[in-house]
Structure formats: C-alpha cells, structure tokens
Amino acid sequence: MKRTLYIKLLIAYLIFAIFGFIIVATFMQQMTLNQLRKNKAEELYRTASWLSENDALMLYKNEISLNSMKILLDDSSAMQQARIQILNPSGLVVVDSDMPVDVDNPVTIEGFDITALSGSFYSVSTFYHQFETEHLSVAAPITLGYAVRGYVVMHYDMTHLQDAADHLLDIDYIMLIILFLLSLIILIFFTELVYIPLRRIIDATEQYAAGNLHYEINVESDDEIGYLAASLAYMAQELARGEDNQKHIVANVSHDFRSPLTSINGFLKAMQDGTIPPEMYPKYIDIVLNETDRLIKLTNNLLTLNNLNTQGMLLEKTDFDINMVIRHTAATFEGSCREKKIAIELSLTGDTLPVTADLTRIQQVLYNLIDNAVKFSHKNSVVKVETTEKHNKVFVSVKDSGIGIPKDSVPYVFDRFYKSDLSRGKDKKGTGLGLSITREIIRAHGENINVISTEGVGTEFIFSLPLCETEPDEPEDLD
C-alpha cells in the first residue's frame, strides 16, 4: 500500500507556500506600487494647487519677482523631494526649481500639451523627454481673470516610489514567512494528533489482516481517532475471542464425537473378531445403541443451536399456564428422581399463572434446567422450582442443592460445550449445549436468564417471561 497521505499534505503545503510568494511578488507588489503612486500624486497635487492659488498667482500679478518665486519653489521642492516648474500654456518654462533663473535664455518644452493629462490629475512618464527615468507628474492650472495663464507642474522620481514599494514588499515577505512558520504548528499538530495515530491504526489493521489478532494499538486519545482505535482494538479482541471459541468448539466437538465413535468401533470389531462371544452381544449392542443415541443428541443440538444463531428463532407464541407446564415437566423426571432419592418441590404462585410464549420452547428450557438440577444434585436432596409474579413478569426459578459451579466458571456456563471441572465426572453423556440452547430460547423471547451458584452449596437458574393479561386455554398436549 502506498503511503502518500503525508506526502500529499507536504506537497499541498509547499504549493501553498509557492503560490503565496508568487502572489506577494506580483499582485501585492503592483498593488502596493499603485497605492503609493496614488497617495503621492494626491499629495503633490495638493501642493501644486496651493502654489497655483497663492505664490504662482502672485507672480502673474507681478506682486513678486522671478527670483523670489524661485526661492519659494526651492523650499517646496526640498520639502516634497520633487522638481517644481511653472509653465506657460505654450510650454515655456517660467521658473524651474532645478534650474537658475535666466530670462535671456528661455527654455521651451517641445510638444507640451496639457490635454495629455485629461481624465487624470497625474501621469507617469519622462514628461516630454525631460528625464531619463519615469517621473510622477501632476499639474495645477494658474487662473487669473477667468483665464488659464499657466501651470504649476511637479515631478517626483518613480525610483523613490519603487524603493518604498520594495521596502513594504520586504515587510510582506517577512510577514508571509512568519505566517508559514506559524502554519507549521498546524502541520505538527496534524502529524502528532492525526497522522501518527492513523499510521498506528493502519499497522494494526495490517497485523489483524495477517492473523495477529492480539496486536495492541498504542493510541491514547479522547477524540474520534482514539475512539476509532479503541473500536478497532475491541473488534480484534472479539474476533480473537471468537477464533479461540471456534477452536475450543472444534476441539470439544471432535472429542465428543470421537469418544462414542471409538467405543462403537471397538465393540463392533471385538464382536467381529470373536473377542466378545455371541452370548454377550445383547449387552454390548445396548452400549452401542446408547453411544449412537448420544451422537444423535449431539448432532441435533448442534443443528438446533446453529439454526438459532444463523436464522433466528421462529416462535409460535400462545397464552398458556406456566404452572401446569412446570407440573407436567417435573413429572417426567419421576424415574430419575426415584433412583437418586431426589424430591422436586414446587412452589407456584396461584392456581394458574398465564404467560405469553412459545410453549414447546419453554418446555425445552424447563426440561434442560430441571435435568441439570437432578443430574448435579446429591442423593436425598431437593430440587426447588418456584414461580413469582412481579411488574407484569413471571420469574421461574430452578434451584438445586448439588455440587455448585466454581466462581470462575459462572460467566461461561452458557457458552457452547462448556463444562466445569466439577461437572465432567457427573455429566458423561452431556453435550455441553443444553444451557446454550436455553439462553438462546429465552433471548428470542426478549427476556433474560441468570445463574447464581456457590460451589458445594448449589445452583439456581432464574428466567423471566411476559405475563399474559387474559386467562389462557388449557393446551391439548404438553408432551
């Protein structure tokens, strides 16, 4: 997989920097120069207008001499760093701040035409070839008796404006560099808070894809990246647990199938080669039949549990009396209880206790729970089955006083094929699927089943069912 996200980000950052400098070097430079030129032209025009309305007008009124006017222009020229001229409409230079007064050798600007400034109060040129470089020139008319007698023209060297624009542009460059350096903070934050954790998550997914589901993601964050990492780690843990469970299930299924198949194969070979005499056949045929029954039961339970998990459970809910179902189910254990001298004590609420559920499935749940209670109870003990009503629910309890379940095994009693060490010796024919099927049936009804157990004291299973509001009809068959 190409790792280009960070490279793309760096390229985008460099493109941003390059375009930033290009924009400053072109658009910003021209905009700055234009603004400085406009401001300087306005300043020069204000000075030229003042001179045309005051000192220059006094000259044309013969109130001051040319030499006095030259002195005034020199002062204004020094203040504005500009060349100042007073021109006649024909282009004759009357006074020039950069030239001495010489009435005997007059200077005329060839081709002078004030209309060249029409549409603007300033121009940028060599002003009729007076200068080697471009100058910013402004002209203010000198009006006397409603007639234009001349013009005050001011010239400012554009190299000064260019130097000022370059100085401001240097400041822009410095600010741009500072901005880029500050923007590196965003890049650093992205690297530390997004890119590095994202790389760790990608590395983890690659490990998970390779089968290493126990790989740990080292991402500690309270934001969405941290939540993604935690979710991915949780998913991997669940997949690992599922894989471990699958291996455990395969191992248990193999063991549970191998044991009866080994017995069947051994007895049949012994009968075939004469090791077992014909008069002993009935005994060993019974053993073989018991082992085949065990295989059939295991296969049926596997198919049932697989259908519950993959296709869901189709329930045929009806209203029935749970107390009556408990009585009929308990009666089927009469033979087993007589052999172990175990009594089943029923403590049922009311004469009838109607519930809404799948009758056949609930019979299966009761059979599995009572069968386990009888199987793991000591001789001369009591198995208690109790019903209680609370908050529109019926709670059914099956409690024994047998070997109990170790504390560390309680969370796993509903897992497939799980058998605690204490139960293995007493449940040689069990498949380890009964409680798993029981839990799936209760869950399909939208209810819960819990277990309470103390090792050496006994175990109690409690499940709930929804209470029926109407009196149910008596079912025809509870077998």
Image: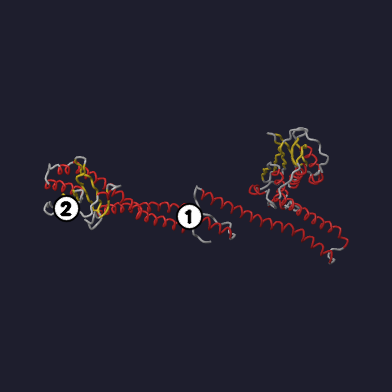
Q: How is the image coloured?
A: secondary structure
In the shown orientation, is residue 236 left or right of residue 94? right
The location of residue 403, given as percent across then percent down, is 70, 47
- Circle 1 SS class: helix
> Residue 195: which numbered mark, if any?
1
Residue at 56% in and 52% down: 232
The earlier-in-sequence mark between 2 and 1 is 2
- Front one among 456 and 479: 479
* Residue 288 image-quadrant placement: bottom right
> Residue 147: which numbered mark, if any?
none
- Circle 2 SS class: loop
- Front one among 305 and 64: 64
**Residue 382 appears in the picture as rendered:** no
Question: Which residue is under mark 2?
Answer: 98
* Residue 287 image-quadrant placement: bottom right
The location of residue 230, given as percent across then percent down, is 54, 50
For the residues labelled 2 and 1, the Cα–Cα distance comes to 68 Å
* Amino acid type at image mark 2: Asp
Residue at 47% in and 58% down: 8
Callout 1 environment at 10 Å: few (<14), some (14 to 19), or many (20+)? some
The location of residue 236, given as percent across then percent down, is 59, 54
In the shown orientation, is residue 246 left or right of residue 335? left
Residue at 68% in and 34% down: 391
Callout 2 environment at 10 Å: few (<14), some (14 to 19), or many (20+)? some
